[in-house]
Amino acid sequence: MSSATQSTILTFEDARHLIEQHAANLRPHGRELLDLLEANGRALAEPITADRDFPPFRRATRDGYAVRAADLAAVPTTLEVVAEAKAGGALVPPIVSGQAVSIMTGAPVPDGADAIVMVELTSRAGNRVEVQRTINPGDNIVPVGAEGKKGDVMLAPGMRLDYAAIGVAAAVGLSRLVVYSRPRIAVLSTGDEVVDIDVPPGPNQIRNSNSYSLAIQITQAGGEPVLLPIAPDEPNRLHELLREGLEGDLLLIAGGVSMGKYDLVEEVLSELEAEFFFTGAQIQPGKPVVFGAVPLGAGAHESSASHKYFLGLPGNPISTMVCFELFARPLVEALAGMQERKLSFVYAKLKTEIKTKLGLKRFLPANLLGEFEDSEVELVKWQGSGDLGAVARSNCYIVIPPDRERIPAGEFVPVLLR
Ligand code: AMP
Ligand code: MG
């Protein structure tokens, strides 16, 4: 911990782990009941339990014939086809030795049968079927309850609901789900040069893109963005807006955290008695990223938390975005009630050599190209961490360790998907 005057610059891994440790203490503050299709992207607040066995009957996984494996000890052999079992059709009576039932994928296997012979391994003539191959008991049958027994927890609280999880909810008959409430994430963009998107910018001004890209990242992480007015590089108004931002569950500040004369965020946060857990990370883009917390006065807030977290993200648009993914997302997700998700990379073959400088872990905009097993990854040309268009046209970031000056084409490199 340090004050704004001391600097604490961590490696990427240390900074990330520190964020994860703090995130582990964060809890969502409410729950709500949502229609199933509204619940996508939210965190489950109550377990989803199996309302019956899955599958509820012995399920055939192939089109073919339900048989007794012992009847096929010597092949070829001919069996009598006594019935047909289709998915959703009437239940078929038990079979005895010498009999078979023509069966379709998804149908209940009749009692007496213990395996399904694939139709491709048989030849049929009238009510006789000749089977060419032996089979083991249990082949091509899913036993009752093999995927889940009645009462089993299928999905635990904290599960991030996606299409597969929504599918599970539907399969157990839930048309509504109890999910955690979305945390309110305040976004404060700073800078005298920054104007909002409905204001014509002067020749020395730029439009506020950060509040909008952050709002989408927050939404994707399960939060509800609360966009504050743009803060000027002036301590009094900045102080006022930071206080307002600290009313949210988490405050994200974009800009004003670098070493410039008008980068006032840390100074003004210090006036609010902020503790700084780190004031920089050895990364590019995003080196000046700041993480800390402000103590809450007694009774200042109805929540039981004793302090409120903030993250100061460097204002360059790519720095802002990358720092959100690396550092803000775990905090937002924890406040949204989601189980922790470790940052993980996929590996892809580098298409074109990379040369860079030592010392920082880099997350550089790139494209995964190619198809099937022949995917390759390549850096996009960009003008540095202000080049928003370059990132918008890319689909991932190549991660370059701090100790590599040159990575040859053909090497497998870690990639952070976007
Ligand atoms: P700062 O981190 O305040 O030094 O800003 C770094 C760069 O990011 C400057 O070029 C700013 O003009 C730019 N920038 C800061 N805030 C925003 C914003 N909200 N939207 C777009 N660009 C910004
Ligand atoms: Mg600034």
Image (tube, grey):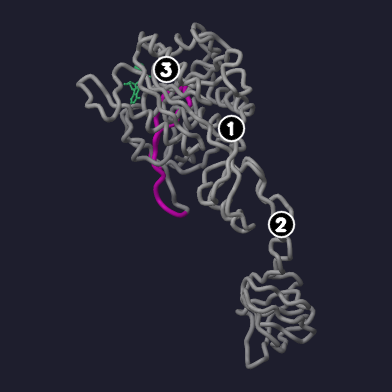
| Alpha carbon distance from label 1 to label 3 | 25 Å
Horizontal and vertical percent for residue 62?
A: 63, 73
The kind of residue on which mark 1 rests is Ala
Label 2: element kind:
loop
Residue 139 visible at all: yes
Q: Is 389 rendered above or below residue 81?
A: above
Ligand 2: give its quadrant.
top left
Answer yes or no: disc 1 within 8 Å of ligand 1: no
Q: Quadrant of the C terminus?
A: top left
Residue denoted by label 1:
334
Q: Residue furthest bottom?
A: 126
Q: Quadrant of the N terminus?
A: top right
Horizontal and vertical percent for residue 365?
A: 39, 35
Task: State the mark number for residue 230.
Answer: none
Residue denoted by label 2:
148
User: Are there few (<14), some (14-19), or many (20+) residues within 10 Å of tag 3?
Assistant: some
Name the residue at 41% across, 44% down. Answer: 368
Name the residue at 46% across, 26% down. Answer: 186
Q: Is residue 370 magenta?
A: yes
Name the residue at 70% across, 78% down. Answer: 91
Residue denoted by label 3:
241
The kind of residue on which mark 2 rests is Gly
- Which sits earlier in the primary sequence, circle 1 or circle 2? 2
Q: Is residue 23 magenta?
A: no
Q: Which residues are magenta?
A: 351-372
Label 1: element kind:
helix
Label 3: element kind:
helix
User: Can you tell which of label 1 and label 3 is closer to the viewer?
Assistant: 3
Name the residue at 34% across, 15% down. Answer: 232
User: Are there few (<14), some (14-19), or many (20+) residues within 10 Å of tag 2?
Assistant: some
Q: Quadrant of residue 172?
A: bottom right
Q: Quadrant of residue 209?
A: top left
